[in-house]
Amino acid sequence: MKTFRRAGPAFVVTAAILWGIIGIFTRTLNTFGFDAVQISFVRAFFTFVFCLSYCLIFNRRALRIDIRDIWLFAGNGILSIAAFNTCYFYTIQSSTLALASILLYTAPCFVILLSRIFFKEKITPKILTALVLSFLGCILTTGGFGSGVTATALITGLTSGFCYALYSIFSKVILKKYTVTTLILYTFFFAAIALSFVSAPLSIFTALKIPDVLLYALGIALFCTLLPYVLYSAGLKRLSPGRASVLAFVEVLTATLTGLFLYHEPLTLPSALGIILIFVSIVLLSRNENK
């Protein structure tokens, strides 16, 4: 049982690695004419379809929820998935990818503060140290704030970070009563509904008739959405939200290495230092939580 509990950091890090390779799928879907919000809808819709299919065949009990808890799943799907994606992509459009990434990864700060408020969790020196190291690593790896700082970018960027943080908070509450399967099923159901209003779904379904498009759509839903969210949620059952959210910084590291090895993007000295800082924070948090 103790060994199983120690698997929490491995679950979260694996989830972050899968999130980090999403560029392989998004770049291809971009060439097929999908914009960022449409890709978000595809991820949410097919994740829901995969999860629903599993429940109907193997685990119908996971379909049952208390009507009084719908607001939790709706809040998780609409705020943590739909609003987060929409704000994040608007930040990219109004500034730079580097700035959007940095503002998005204010999320662990929000998680730690919200966890203190709602779950009375301690803010330990180790978590704070790892948070600072990871955030500095993110700034170095993505290239810093650059010249794209505008009021709109700051508002939408910080909002994306806050909404991203809410997944850990909503999910921690939901997982006290429901399984990871139920969490994912209804979270992405509400996310898909919300995203359908801003993504022109009819044009998406028309494009999905092309086999290659459908293949990448299914791939991004399975490998970069369903599996990592299942793993991250499972990690949340064994870790504090603050610790899990800082460990997820490995997504930045993975995305950088993916760009380096697959797309031959240059690796600068600051980026290399950023990777080292993120790696150190991961090692720090992967040790026994009570130390």
Image (cartoon, rainbow, N blue to C red):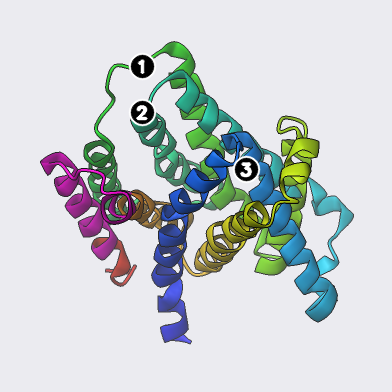
From the viewer's perspective, is 17 left or right of 74?
Answer: left
**Mark linked to residue 99:** 2
Image height of 112 relative to 61, above or below = above
Tell me which numbered mark, 3 or 2, is placed earlier along the sequence: 3
Q: Are marks 3 and 1 in contact (CB under 8 Å)?
A: no
- Tag 2, which secondary structure? helix
In the image, residue 89 lies at what x, y percent? 53, 31
- Circle 2 packing at 10 Å, graded few (<14), some (14-19), many (20+), is many
Residue underneath mark 3: 40
Q: Nearer the viewer, residue 204 or 273?
A: 204
Badge 1 marks a residue whose secondary structure is: loop
Residue 191 appears left or right of 21:
right
Residue type indicated by callout 1: Val
- Residue 149: mark in rendering: 1
Q: How far from the left and from the top, in percent, is residue 118?
A: 56, 47
Q: Earlier in the sequence, mark 3 or mark 1?
A: 3
Q: Give whichever of 37, 262 is nearer the camera.
A: 262
- Magenta span: 256-283
Q: Tell me the kind of residue under disc 3.
A: Ser
At a point 23% along the width and 40% down the height, the residue shown is: 136
Give the CA distance from mark 3 to mark 1.
25 Å
Q: Tag 2: residue type? A: Leu
Query: Most prominent secondary structure in the magenta stretch?
Result: helix
Q: Is residue 274 magenta?
A: yes
